[in-house]
Amino acid sequence: MQLDKFQVYTETRRPSKASQSGWVLAEGMVAVSVGLMLLVAVVGIFVDCSISFAAISNYVSMDSKSRNALDHMTSNIRRAKALTSYDPAALIFNYDTAGTTNLAYRYNASTGVLTEEWTASGTTTTTTLLTGCNSLSFSLYDKDLASTSTGSAGKVISIAWQCASSVVGRTNSESMQQAQIVIRNQP
């Protein structure tokens, strides 16, 4: 059978079975690349959110510990009978009229630890109130709020500290507290 010129050019060619069978290598590589980029983006977002969550949890924990320590110190200092010794890193109180019970707050700058020491009948009990403090200082004021360094003249104690902690080795959380506490029983 002979075909004329017109029929040869107008006849449609059907695609071969090989070109209909599936993706070509280039299409597959593009799809895999796009899929990997999406996966990397999702993992990056997950890791970033996890670090942020850990940092927020760390901050909340530090803030809670700072507030508890401040509340505890405030309660004990207000009930103290007299401030017997003052230093910017230590306070010592006489806690009863007989002078047998003493309370001391000490800050160790090299370890960043604030401790509370109760001494009663010759026995000393030490409790750690805060750890990880970068700075802590006590200031003493008299009843007219003038700065003083004499323990017996002191009526108001100002406390200020800053604690820090790191999460995953790169995110720092800081907690700062400051308060003024009146020694109620001090004349």
Image (spheres, rainbow, N blue to C red):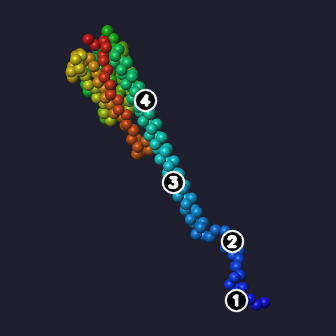
Give the class, few, some or many, for how many residues have Cα within 10 Å of label 1's Cα (few <14, many ≥20).
few
Point out the tag, 4 or 3, that comes first from the N-terminus: 3
Foreground mark, 2 or 3, reads 2
Horizontally, residue 83 falls left or right of residue 59, namely: left
Point out the tag, 2 or 1, that comes first from the N-terminus: 1
Q: Residue at x 41, y 31 (%)?
A: 63
Q: Is residue 67 above or below residue 26?
A: above
Point out the tag, 3 or 1, that comes first from the N-terminus: 1
Q: Quadrant of the C terminus?
A: top left
**Percent x, y for residue 51?**
46, 44
Point out the tag, 4 or 1, that comes first from the N-terminus: 1
The answer to the question of whether label 2 and label 1 lie on touching residues, with beta carbons closer than 8 A, is no
- In the picture, the disc for residue 5 is 1
Give the CA separation, mark 3 to mark 1.
Answer: 58 Å
Q: Amino acid at mark 2?
A: Gln
Can residue 38 be seen in this snapshot? yes
Q: Is residue 119 above or below residue 177?
A: above
- Residue behind mark 3: 41
Q: Quadrant of the N terminus?
A: bottom right
Give the CA separation, mark 2 to mark 1.
Answer: 29 Å
Point out the tag, 2 or 3, that comes first from the N-terminus: 2
- In the picture, the disc for residue 64 is 4
Q: Amino acid at mark 4?
A: Ser
Q: Residue at x 70, y 79 (%)?
A: 12
